Image: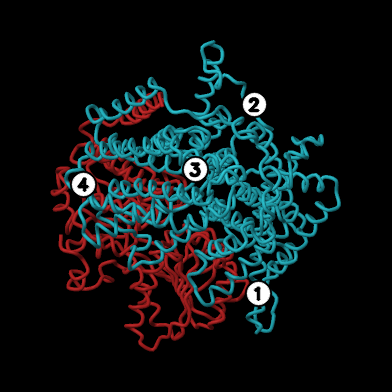
Amino acid sequence: MRARNYFVGAAFALLAGGMAHSALAQDIKIGEINSYSLLPAFTEPYRKGWQLAVEEINAAGGINGKKLVVISKDDGGKPADAQTAANELVSSEGVAMLAGTFLSNIGLAVSDFANQKKVFFLAAEPLTDAITWSKGNKYTFRLRPSNYMQAAMLVEAASKLPAKRWATIAPNYEYGQSAVAVFKKLMSAKRPDIQWVDEQWPPQGKIDAGPVVQAVAAANPEAILNVTFGADLVKLVREGNTRGLFKGREVVSFLTGEPEYLDPLKDETPEGWIVTGYPWYSIKTPEHDAFLKAYQAKYNDYPRLGSIVGYQTIKSAAAILAKAGSTDPEKLIAAAEGLSMPSPFGEITFRKIDHQSTLGAFVGKTALKDGKGVMVDSSYKKGADYLPSDAEVAKLRPKD
Amino acid sequence: MAFYVVQFLTGLASAASLFLVASGLSIIFGVTRIVNFAHGAFYMIGAYIAFTLTERLSGAFGFWGSIVLAALAVALIGVIVEMVLLRRIYHAPELFQLLATFGLTLMVEDLVVLIWGPDDLVGRRAPGFKGAIDFFGQNIPSYDLFLIVLGPVVLGILWLLFQRTRWGVLVRAATQDRDMVAALGVNQKWLFTSVFAVGVFLAALGGALQIPRDAVHHAMDLRIIVEVFVVVVIGGLGSIVGAFVAAVLVSELNAFGILIFPKISIILVFLVMAVVLIVRPWGLFGKPEAAARKTPGLTVNPWRPLTSNERLAALAALVVAATLPLFAGNYALTVGSEIAVFVIFAVSLHFLMSVGGLASFGHAAYFGLGAYGIAFLAKMAGLPMIVCLLLGPLLGCMGAAVFGFFAVQLSGVYFAMLTLAFAQIVWSIAFQWVSVTGGDNGILGLWPSSWAASPSHFYWLALGVAALVTIALRAMVFSPFGYALRATRDSLLRSEAIGIDAKRIQWTAFVIAGTTAGIGGALFAYLKGSVFPDNLGISLSVDALVMVLLGGVETVSGAVIGAIVYKALNIWLVSQTDLSKLVLGGFIVLIVVVFPKGIVGMLEMLVQRRRKSSPPGSPLLAKPIESAE
């Protein structure tokens, strides 16, 4: 037991050592948290994106003359560790706001922390509707188009399909469940004639694709909704291709057009799926061109959707900080509500009513080109057009 | 009808992949008794190397050559790992090798991202097995048929190897009684190395063969390791045929289960394992473990209560810890609270493992139940914090009472795996029962009442509870109950012969440990302000095991140090470096080599040695300590 004293001392000496940071007192600090070690395929481009944004902001004179510093932490994919990181950023680094997160449960954990500790939090990636609606709070804002918005964009295209018998395949956790639920609800509202003939819920990351594909095929649907992504998607596509599941069937798929998930499929990319995604190669707007040029010049690599999310998260944070002219959380909230700013996808606004940004997404079809998967016939869907009416949102969100 | 046949064949293909990996694990465990946590890592490296090779070498020969070459290369890595690392620690306490292989796994997860990059890699299809075969209108991928044939072929080769070669005879003999094999003059070193190499080869082959149907990525190892363990245990440890039957059973139940319950996959293997172990305690084809031949009392230093000086030192340490709020900031205090919570969690497992000799692989279940207990009481019943803290751990207590009853009927690794199965069942309930538990989005907004809200108050609360729990469990170790429990650990037969009701004693210990873990979980819920299924998950159970082993499983309170070192290091590394897993894994491997008895175990041994050299040492403790082996 004697050693305990020593180890406690050592542990805290180490911690104290870690607290010393190169940032100067007059710098403006943003605390950033993401699942770097768990999801490197998404978070590495994401990190590059926000690093580019920091560089651009400081090159342009910082925020109201002050240098912007982003302090980044890994949460390892665990909500509890994300809170530890958030606490470190707020309590010992003294950051002006928190930003980032990928997984929905981690986004919610940090948003609850922000609400409790009265800290401004800009959620970058988590898609769950709960973060702005049922579990929304005044300190939390969210950048990416939510589950609901992406479902609404896909439903717009899917409801025009003649298919009446639908099956769903989704990972068995909150994201998959709510994506399917929203899609079904919106779809059935537009097309009461639709039948839902089968649903498959493989565990996230552990799909046993053969039996799943076989089971879906046995229900003989005319169209399939897919929500799996990453390695699960690869297995599903490979099994589905070999077993002819997608032949003669329409497929509507969440996120599959994002380079993170589309590129690994290479020459096995299934053609004609209706997907949300990011066709960086075919976006021809001045805003995006500027971003693309800067990104490729810095990294000699093409951007993924994560790059956009990382870039715009820090750009948005900087715009909010600049407008507030202060790091007081209440002033930051006041500044952020209703604030419009440019983005690589065009102007976006953080809505006052639910703190959701109007960043949109691209909807298009998958195709094969030179042995690689691409998105074709894509068009940008503005986020603002795919949100429910203000009256409905007010009902969904608890009063602050 | 054709559909059911095809679904059955699809299940068989899944079973073949599972079997390859599981058979390797089973062989390694049977002979060396190593719970090889790194088996999944070898599987993953096999896939990565095979990916690189198949991209370079073209043609049919290139592809199949690459697969075999990759498996051989990984087997070589396995040999190096065995000779450099594991050989040093075969004589360490049971399960200590788990710690080493856990450290390796952590390192490999970061290393593959460093070497191969973060993107998912999709390899080539197998030449000659690219398409599908039409079976009455249903498509069967030809690669599936290849796997279906390969499974039994590998089984046959292994059978021949074990039944018809001298090496196989030795392996079987060692699986049954390795001390006897050693006594008969067989060179164990090379036997173990060769067995490890074969096991790793099979794992890597299993990984390499996934290239045509899976994506290669850095989380492949965790995806498979638990599942193959379950398969091995269902089949019966050390039984290759058992592993095959279990793989088929699990895969077929999954293939047909999802037709009726599409959400069954998440829990199926654990349900099967729980049922099998309750009905057949040694798996389908396993045999009861031969009684260990260790002589109690010789491998372990006799435990004694702290001397007055040591008590004073411990008290002083506590006082120093209690003054932390005077000079540390809020973040350090919150980290301190978290460490205190994990001290509670670790000592509760340590009580079960060290004193009771029952290593639980699912201890997080009771920690998490305590946390959910708080969530239900605070959010649904709206009770005040103090009442919640008193009542919340009761959920952990109840869980432990129910599951413990079944678990203590088993022993050794079977006990461990049944606790794992129960933990996973509880986890999946928390994960799936969205209307009550909120699913994986958890239950939010459980912040402490104002009297405990400030970081310093909460720190004192957590520290106080941790100290009380540690003292209470220590007192129990030296109580008549503790002696009885230690008796059941050291010799079940002898303890029953003198009239100890072993199962009841062990059950009681299980409930005590579960309740204590629940106390930790309850505090954790308030510390984080939220509860997630993660709080019941495998990774938390593994963390607890690592803390206990790091501290020293043969000590009375080593888990306290183990928890402090592991948690502080973990939090610090995650905060400071992007390669925290690599550094932490390397650190664990280093500790394993330098402190083969755990940190506290090693310190105690050093103190012992010093006492021995100075004459006034107690005669009992001065006795030479020998390993019974």
Separation of marks 3 and 4 at Cα, in angstroms: 33 Å
Question: Upstream in the sequence, badge 2 or badge 3?
Answer: 3
- Colouring scheme, one of rainbow, by chain, secondary structure, one colour: by chain
Can the viewer see residue B189? yes
Q: Secondary structure at mark 4?
A: helix
Q: Secondary structure at mark 3?
A: helix
Where does label 4 land, which residue?
A117
Where does label 3 land, which residue?
B545
In the image, residue A282 sits, relative to residue B387, either above or below, namely below
Q: Is residue A175 left or right of residue B125?
A: left
What mark, if any, has residue B8 been given in the picture? 1
Point out the frontmost of discs 2 and 3: 2
* Residue drawn at (62%, 49%) of the image: B48
* Residue drawn at (56%, 81%) of the image: A218
Point out the frontmost of discs 2 and 1: 2
> Where in the figure is residue B65, as x and y percent of width and height?
75, 52
Mark 1 — on which chain does it sit? B
Which chain is rendered red in the image?
Answer: A
Mark 2 — on which chain does it sit? B
Q: Is residue B477 left or right of residue B605?
A: left
